[in-house]
Amino acid sequence: MSKFRSYKEFSGYSTAFRQWRADSHCRFIHGYALKFKVWFEGDLDHRNWVVDFGCFKRNGVKDWLKHQFDHTTVVATDDPDLLLFQDMAAKDMIQLRVMPDVGCEKFASMVFNYLDSIIEKETEGRARVYKVQCWEHSENMAEYYGE
């Protein structure tokens, strides 16, 4: 890959989740306005772009992010209270998303893997996702780098 990189921010995803294994207050349901910062790397296309940022609406990335993280409650597959969350979802109290793992680190890797597969197709292998950051707020962030 070349040395060209570009960056896109996806923000405004009001997400509630909990770290049921935590020994701190993070074990309680709490929420953030999540923000994802994504870096792309690759050769330039005929327009001199690494990635066409306009593609994210067309290829469903924005809809996917909204579905996963906007006004949703995310719990882990092995959360001991999963049935309670499923009951709340059945009563239309929450929009439940069950994921293998919960937390900014895992959200960053999930977004990385999803977007990387999309960018691979969009650019026919010319570009890739370099890294993804998941921000809870201005002081807390986790990031995931690809191989």
Image: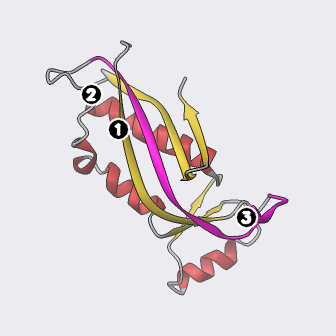
Looking at the image, is mark 2 or mark 3 earlier in the sequence?
Answer: 3
* Residue hosting label 3: 79
Secondary structure found at label 1: helix
Q: Give the amino acid at mark 3.
A: Asp
Give yes or no for residue 123 being in the magenta stretch. no
- Asked if the residue under mark 3 is in contact with the one under mark 1, i.e. CB atoms within 8 Å, the reply is no
Secondary structure found at label 3: loop
* Residue hosting label 2: 123
Residue 57 rendering spot, x and y as whole percentages: 25, 50
Query: Farthest top residue?
Result: 2
Residue at 50% across, 56% down? 34
- Say the numbered circle drawn on residue 118: 1
Residue sitting nearer the eye, 21 or 11: 11
Secondary structure found at label 2: loop
Give yes or no for residue 29 being in the magenta stretch. yes
Residue 23 rendering spot, x and y as whole percentages: 85, 59
What separation in Å lies between label 1 and label 2 (alpha carbons)?
A: 9 Å
Residue sitting nearer the eye, 28 or 137: 137
Q: How is the image coloured?
A: secondary structure
- Asked if the residue under mark 2 is in contact with the one under mark 1, i.e. CB atoms within 8 Å, the reply is no
Q: Image quadrant for the N terminus?
A: top left
Compared to 142, does 128 lie above or below? above
User: Which stretch appears magenta?
Assistant: 22-43
What separation in Å lies between label 1 and label 3 (alpha carbons)?
A: 30 Å
Residue at 57% across, 35% down? 144
Residue at 55% across, 79% down? 89
Query: Farthest left residue?
Result: 46
Residue at 52% across, 41% down? 133
